[in-house]
Image (spheres, rainbow, N blue to C red):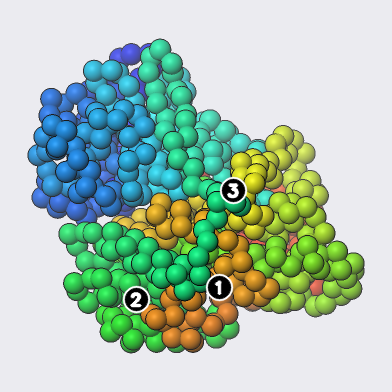
Amino acid sequence: MCGICGLLETGGGAPDRDLLGRMNQTLLHRGPDSGGVRVEGRAGIAARRLSIIDLALGDQPIANEDESVWVVQNGEIYNYKELREELAAAGHTFHTNGDTEALVHAYEQWGPRFPEHLRGMFAIAIWDVREQRLVLARDRFGIKPLYYREANGTLSFASELKALLQQPDFSREIDLDALEAFLDHAMVPAPLTIFAGTRKLPAGHVLTWTERDGVQVERYARPAPPPEREMLNGSEDELAERIRETLRDSVRAHLIADVPVGVMLSGGIDSSALTAFAATESSERVRTFSIGFEEETFNELDKAREVAQRYDTDHHELVLRPNAIELLPGIVEAFDEPFADNSALPTYLVSDLAAKHVKVALSGEGGDELFGGYYTYVADYLAPRFGRVAAAMRPALQLVPASTRSSSWEERLKRFAHGGHLPPLERHHAWREVFSADARAELLAPGRRGTADPVDLFRARYGETNGAEELGRLMDVDVGTYLVDDLLVKMDRASMAHSLEARVPFCDPVVAELAFALPARHKVRWFDKKRLLRKALQPLLPETILGARKQGFSLPTASWLRGDLQAFARATLSADTLRRQGFFRPEVVEPMLDAHASGRRNASRQLWALLTFTLWFERYAA
């Protein structure tokens, strides 16, 4: 696991080696074990390394035999041993024992589309000295980040925006389309970044640069649900066994390391399954890490302990008594961009806990999107049957007192009534949106509106899967947006802030192919979620885990914003600060704070978004 960065002088000349070194140093937290810089002609590439595989010989950058191709990577290639055998048989010579060297030879063998052959999580940069070609690649699910910028004759790239900010000419102009998307989604989706002149390489894409063609971005992989006629057939017992063995194989691959591997154990189905598989596949006693809350309705420590005891793990836990006022600046520092998923806070803390004991930990991201774990999928299932009835009840539901939990049944019913009558994609989005289009129009100051509709990113993804089952199409939208740009961003930044490598076995090409091919009836039926996954895991997990209501890594932010966090929020979102920053209208924000504090409205999601953006702006853009 590493952080990578680079500079390419597109007009010729040598890159600024000192600047490249400073960029690399900002990524120290991603790779504290070693650092390397290589300048060849007009290009320079650099990496910080967290040593996981081939501890002695794996420092980067790494070259081929005649040093005509150089590579840096952030991530792990789980099929690297098979690749090495295949490439050695084709005549390539290896001088290390790790996965990174396989990449230069894979590029030599297959060209810029070499990522098609990789099973892993990665952001890769290759500089081909002979061809004068730069190749950047990102894994199929976007597990590892990669930003790039082309300005003033320089093409630069990095694992995090903070490295690019080292460039003296970096423009901090806010991308207003990205701001609108953030207010809509609570994150900034690819290819946008919050800065107008910088972009993210989308998941499953390759960027190439040559002097003749300039920058070219091409998709090389697109995990997706197949047409409905091609869905898997078979009995539930047969399919459950196939799921179980496919997940076992994925966990086995994700355990490959020359250092101990742990599991982030929340007590939910997905992380409990990973613990079960890791404990039975590992040659060592597995370490597990859990976070709990003082608020009992948000606490799953009992479930986590039950799984830890069943599999005799070396279990570590922390009861969260968070001082959000102290922790939020660290979260803002780690994320580079505005990010309003409040579960970043416990993820940040459990990563800190795990990093005290291991360098690698497995995490359960992807299980909900692939196997049907969210209540939004229940709502998608129910909407054709009851959506219009719920919409008619909407005026009456507004009279129901606001809950302190956005996941309460009252709040879910309100959201269902809000979007249940809409077309499939629009209603699915309506249940996730933070600020609606009308709310953004009211909130944003004059001249601060974007020109693009944030929902267009969802529509584009949805439009690619015509012919697939409806629920599968909506789950695929979440895989390509919410999973990539929220959950995986959260896990990457929170874990890497503590020099911890987080691996996500559900986000494996083999697992995804199987999950996408399962008919929707095996995932969601009425209020029953993850139907077939639960059946697959019955031999491994107790019913207390399999039958429990999903909680996730949510936080009691609604009650915090009415209590200990209220004064901090009001100070941060003061009229003076908002006018100085110039994005949000104080006359809209102040009544929102008042309505939430009085209990008339649960505006915790909206206030958290405004709070995190304002703190981010003060740190990175003011």
Contact, mark 2 vs mark 1 (Cβ under 8 Å): no
Distance CA(mark 3)–CA(mark 1): 21 Å
From the top left corner, tell me how far across and down residue 505 is, in percent: 38, 60
Mark 2 lies on a secondary structure that is helix
> Which quarter of the figure has residue 564?
bottom right
The crowd level at tag 1 (other Cα within 10 Å; few <14, some 14-19, many 20+) is many
Q: Can residue 294 be seen in this view?
A: yes
The crowd level at tag 2 (other Cα within 10 Å; few <14, some 14-19, many 20+) is many
| Amino acid at dot 2 | Ala
Relative to 557, does residue 457 appear above or below in the rendering? above
Residue closer to the observer: 443 or 467: 467
Observer-side mark, 3 or 2, equals 3
| Residue tagged 3 | 227
Give the mark nearer the N terminus: 3 vs 2.
Answer: 3
The crowd level at tag 3 (other Cα within 10 Å; few <14, some 14-19, many 20+) is some
> Which quarter of the figure has residue 100?
top left
Observer-side mark, 3 or 1, equals 3
Mark 1 lies on a secondary structure that is helix
Task: Classify residue 218 as left or right of residue 112.
Answer: right
Q: How many marks?
A: 3
> Which quarter of the figure has residue 318?
bottom left
| Residue tagged 1 | 531
Give the mark nearer the N terminus: 3 vs 1.
Answer: 3
Observer-side mark, 2 or 1, equals 1
Relative to 512, does residue 374 appear above or below in the rendering? below
From the top left corner, tell me how far across and down residue 468 is, in percent: 62, 50
Give the mark nearer the N terminus: 2 vs 1.
Answer: 2
**Which residue is painted at 13% across and 25% down in the image?**
66
**Which residue is painted at 39% across and 54% down in the image?**
510
| Residue tagged 2 | 276
**Which residue is painted at 55% across and 86% down in the image?**
296
